[in-house]
Image (cartoon, helix red, strand yellow):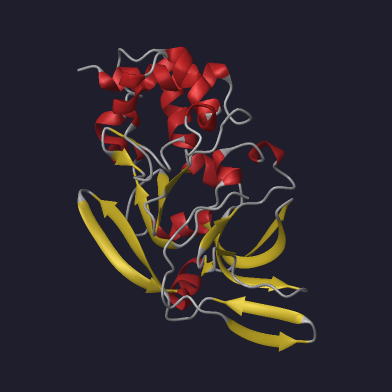
Amino acid sequence: MRFRALIFVAGLGIIFSLSGCLIRETAPVNASLLITTTQEASVKNMFVTVAELESSAGVSPIDTDWPFEKAHYEGVLLKDLVRWMRKTGEGDALVVHCRDGFRAVFPLEFIQKYPAGLVTKVNDKRPHRWKSYKGREMGFYVALPSKSFPELNDSQYGNFWPWQVQGLELVKLSLFLGRADLSSNPRATASIREGQKAFVAQCIHCHEALGQGGDKGPDLSKAVANHAEDSFVKYVKNPKALYPNSQMPGFERVLSDQKLKSIFTYLNALAKP
């Protein structure tokens, strides 16, 4: 798995309890997450501890079988999180806010289809610590299954688990996108709508569009001005071919030329007044 460099979140330590060779690790019960919901334009923010989150939304097993990670976790399934958050808010997408500005957007249809969950405990029959990157513990992260869902292998969701999670927000996707939402625009073509869907699935985690999205990369609604369609497609497929020091991974296996062209069409539509 390709991990992202992040600042360590203080307080996300590890508690061990041994039973034979079983090593169980859990986030501290006082570690907290910011939960944000909106109902009828009224925004509610609250901090909840791990214990409160598990008590409110329930605990489930989360098993992974990726080449880079085969483990048994416990945590709160995203669908259970959404069900609990809907008691105080409305929305059709869950935004996972990470320490470094990475924002994973999980539409409701994805959440209902895949048993992804927020990891709070690690259970395994081998020594296992919270995943770390460059000596920094990852803390809370969203784990996704793989064995039953091979289509996730070559997707943004499969290759980038959100980690160092510090907040969860239930949103209406159209409102979250703001001016970048063209799905209901009568002038939007099928290609534009397909491009918006692909942008949300693959790009919005790191990039903004008209100010909405992650802030690890440039606002793509402005960046397309520097590219023709062909050069945009080539760059996204293999960024290092043009810029050897680029931190952006290549999407050659993830996005077809047709999908990339539809993203370009969508971004171009945003760039036009």
Q: Residue at x 53, y 32 (%)?
A: 240
**Residue 88 seen by the camera:** no
Corner quadrant of residue 165: bottom left
Q: Residue at x 64, y 40 (%)?
A: 152
Corner quadrant of residue 251: top right
Camera-nearest residue between 177 and 7: 7
The number of numbered badges drawn on the structure is 0
Q: Residue at x 56, y 33 (%)?
A: 250
Q: Residue at x 35, y 30 (%)?
A: 220
In this view, the residue farthest toward the front is 244
Task: Measuring from the top left, give residue 122's x and y in whole percent.
Answer: 64, 71
Corner quadrant of residue 157: top right
The answer to whether 8 is drawn above or below residue 217 in the figure is below
Does 230 sit left or right of 269 as displayed?
right
Task: Measuring from the top left, give residue 14's x and y in whole percent.
Answer: 56, 80
The answer to whether 165 is drawn above or below residue 180 in the figure is below
Does 5 sit left or right of 216 as displayed?
right
Task: Measuring from the top left, give residue 248's x and y in whole percent.
Answer: 49, 39
**Residue 201 seen by the camera:** yes
- Quarter occupied by the C terminus: top left
Camera-nearest residue between 63 and 87: 63
